[in-house]
Amino acid sequence: MIRFILLQNRQGKTRLAKYYVPLEDSEKHKVEYEVHRLVVNRDPKFTNFVEFRTHKVIYRRYAGLFFSLCVDITDNELAYLECIHLFVEILDHFFSNVCELDLVFNFHKVLVYLILDEFILAGELQETSKRAIIERMGELEKLE
Amino acid sequence: MNPFSSGTRLRDMIRAIRACKTAAEERAVVRKECAAIRAAINENDQDYRHRNLAKLMFIHMLGYPTHFGQMECLKLIASPGFPEKRIGYLGLMLLLDERQEVLMLVTNSVKQDLNHTNQYIVGLALCALGNICSAEMARDLAPEVERLLQFRDPNIRKKAALCSIRIIKKVPDLAENFINPVAALLKEKHHGVLITGIQLCTDLCKVSPEALEYFRKKCTDGLVRTLRDLVNSPYAPEYDIAGITDPFLHIRLLKLLRVLGQGDADASDAMNDILAQVATKTESNKNAGNAILYECVETIMSIEDNGGLRVLAINILGRFLSNRDNNIRYVALNMLMRAITVDAQAVQRHRATILECVKDSDASIRKRALELVYLLVNESNVKPLTKELVDYLEVSDQDFKGDLTAKICSIIEKFSPEKIWYIDQMLKVLTEAGNFVKDEVWHALVVVISNASDLHGYTVRALFRALQTTAEQESLVRVAVWCIGEYGDLLVNNAGMLNVEDPITVTESDAVDVVESAIKRHASDLTTKSMALIALLKLSSRFPSCSGRIKDIVVQHKGSLVLELQQRSLEFNSIIEKHQNIRSALVERMPVLDEASFGGRRASSLPNTVSTSNGTAVKLPNGVAKSSAAPLVDLLDLSDDVPAPSSSGGDFLQDLLGVDLAPATQSGTSQAPKAGTDVLLDLLSIGSNPAQDNSVSTPDILSSAQDHKPAIASLDVLAAPSNMMDLLDGFAPAPPKPANNGPAYPSIVAFESSSLRLTFNFSKQPGNPQTTTISGTFTNLSSNVFTDFVFQAAVPKFLQLHLDPASGNSLPASGNGTITQSLKVTNSQHGKKPLVMRLRIAYKVDGKDVLEEGQINNFPRDL
């Protein structure tokens, strides 16, 4: 199960945070700070998996953004790497060559959160087809 | 209507915030916006609620508190329109979590939305529910969600399935209701619904054993068929990733099969073919393929045994190990650790590759590989493996050295085939990384050395040689110094030469040189210096010709500011100068340290009676073992550093003095100087406010007397000085010391100062072992009368104390009369912890107030 998803930039600013476990606000900030510190210092040659408290964080860096997923210890890390990549591809499709600013400003159309909610729910994968998600987003847009 | 709030669009606010150059500026902007939003909320502003909440969410993401917006979410959710609901639900998921009570208010709205005609709204509700519902909400809304599992729209079915996962996690009792709908979901064709159904099924099986049984019987075949169809399916552009159709579905199916097949032979049989097919046909040049193979291997290792499949799995892991991608290697090492329990032989074949991984540049791979190597060691491969690891030790990183050293040491200890190999390897490790070697490890080495009597000569010569090359490693210096002290004569006489040795000429003064340099070394710490001092004492006896020179060295520390060194220096000097007749007896070879009892003691710190040979217990005419000074001195020397030998020395001492000295358990070196200093402080400032002098240590001792082993160690070492008192101030009237194996509860002198003595006599009621009645007798040793005599005592939490009134409060001088007072102590940790008590005695002498404080540590052990 995915416990939380974080998108952070190199400086540690959180661009997207979705938690599937209950945490106090102060705990959330602590977690975000720790994950950032953990992930930003790692050499690109190292593995994409880090142990974090009693779970593990699977992260990938895309340009200036770190996509971090915190999952249970027993989960398949390689699968979640694919998951991150699929998510990035979907975002890419929506924003055509997505960059960090897109995420910041289009947050208000809550597009990013909507996409995420179509992709992952309750900490588990909801839909594996890029096309299906994009179609659904299209339908939702029409309702706005 | 506040013009400001309607004016700023979200985009403008974001721009304004980003334009801020300092944190203070940003806070100001945010504060203004929050104020505007709060005003809008108060006015119940309908039109811009949507926008305000969006702003609020952005502000929340920046890290500012936004609780005032929670009710807004609720109002938005209750609105009829889709956009408002959407923002409301989003706000709900972001700003609230299941622990907030506000969430309950939303239950009704969510219920209505779950029944809405607009399926997008139903979707919104399911999404919110699945992400943050609480247990009560789950219970309330479970029937709705169940119904939606069969809704016509696959999107809703998907969401309902995942929502159900959360529901059964929160309320496991509801699991039964979902079994039947899930069985239907597993037959779906739509990938999205299928994968969510599978996930729900997996979680159901985890939560409910009945569900597990049901699915195992009914659905295993169906799932196997689904997987087969998936593996054989033609190219499907929608789900294709790296040439594989929907790897996520593959992986989920494999995981569910694992859950179903674990522990059940029939189910495992049914899946053997498909597992073999997946394992052999999946391409592994891309991450997606590797992910599937990884899951497949995990499944194979978890289900019931099938030899062929297991071999296949381990081969895949072997391939992973040689992959250049770090991720893959990491994953392989992880799996191999689990595979060892299943089939150790197969894993042994990959030993060489694993050894290579220990030297990898990535720290997490190194760590995993090292653990794996540790599991792989057995009697046949221990020598080459250790050689490799020790060679690597020389070139490894500093931060890795600690781990590596610890592992090497435990491998050496567990599997060493013969003592000489053990000693060799340990010497190598000490030479290379002595500073990382833990105390227990080199203590164990000393024990082994002392037991291998035929190797004494060899060892001491090897150590001598090692010290010539490098004297940087503290532990090496300590072990070497100890050995040279003990076996110096063997060193000089080249006794017991083994064939493999080169001859080496060492003169007596060379040996003394080495020990002297150990003392003089700037980097030597207290332990090393103390050990060196006693080694010098031993050498002065073994090499009489160097005695004068040794005396000079020892005397240099007479004025040392460290009390331990000062004490030793003075004592040893006095022994060398004035007590030559007993010197040789004092420093005879130490009795062989009993490995068995030492090993037992390391496992559990209960005192074992030690059957040591009485090598040093020469009973001398002046009674209470002056000879015990040697083991006692060694006790102080080694009990600071070498708990194990001293514990045998300690028990040994126990026999001599009949006093229960509990074995000093593992105390780190940092504890050692403190314990040493405490001993001396007690010794040299007997009775005069040790509480203040030991102010650092005594609170530690008492407060952590509960469960802190080093504290107990220092406690017990502190017990030693009460005997030391007798030894060194031989002139003090020795109160009747407990004789060898005296009455079960010998009386003790609890407290003694220059003017006051307190003796305790103990008795217990039969049948009530936890409670001891103590009768205390105060004697006035000075020539002044004490008036207003008050005695107070304090005990740690595990003891209960009851003080009876004293017989009087005036104590005549010079022991012409006594005051008696009775105490009752109940030890709730009877048998586990000895009694400990702090005293405070106040009285008046010639109208002046006097306060004496002390601590009693020499209670008999079994009170």
Image (cartoon, coloured by chain):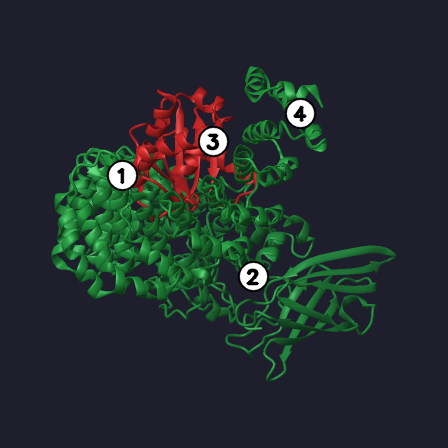
Chain colours: A red, B green
Quadrant (top left, top right, bottom left, bottom right) of the N terminus of chain B:
top right
Q: CA distance from mark 3 to mark 1?
A: 66 Å
First in sequence: mark 1 vs mark 2: 1
Give how far apart the Cα atoms at labels 2 and 3 are.
83 Å
Q: CA distance from mark 2 to mark 4?
A: 65 Å
Identified by mark 2, the residue type is: Ala
- Residues beneath discs 2 and 4 located on the same chain: yes
Chain letter of the residue carrying label 1: B
Q: Quadrant of residue B52?
A: top right
In whole angstroms, how far apart are the C-alphas of marks 3 and 4? Answer: 33 Å
Along the line of sight, the residue nearer the viewer: B95 or B489: B95
Name the mark nearer the viewer: 1 or 2.
1
Q: Which chain is home to disc 3?
A: A
Kindly identify the amino acid type of the residue bearing the numbered disc 1. Leu
> At label 4, which amino acid type do we have?
Arg
Q: Position of residue B66 (x, y in %)?
A: 62, 34
**Residue located 44% across and 63% down the image:** B605
Which quadrant of the structure image shows residue B646? bottom left
Secondary structure under the numbered disc 1 in the rendered image:
helix
Q: Marks 1 and 3: in contact by CB < 8 Å? A: no
Identify which residue, B81 or B424, lies in the foreground: B81
Quickly name the residue at label 3: A143
User: Which residue bears the numbered disc 2?
Assistant: B719
Q: Residue A111, relative to residue A2: is it above or below?
A: above
- Residue at the far bottom: name it: B766
Q: Which mark is residue B855?
A: none
B41 lies left or right of B364 = right
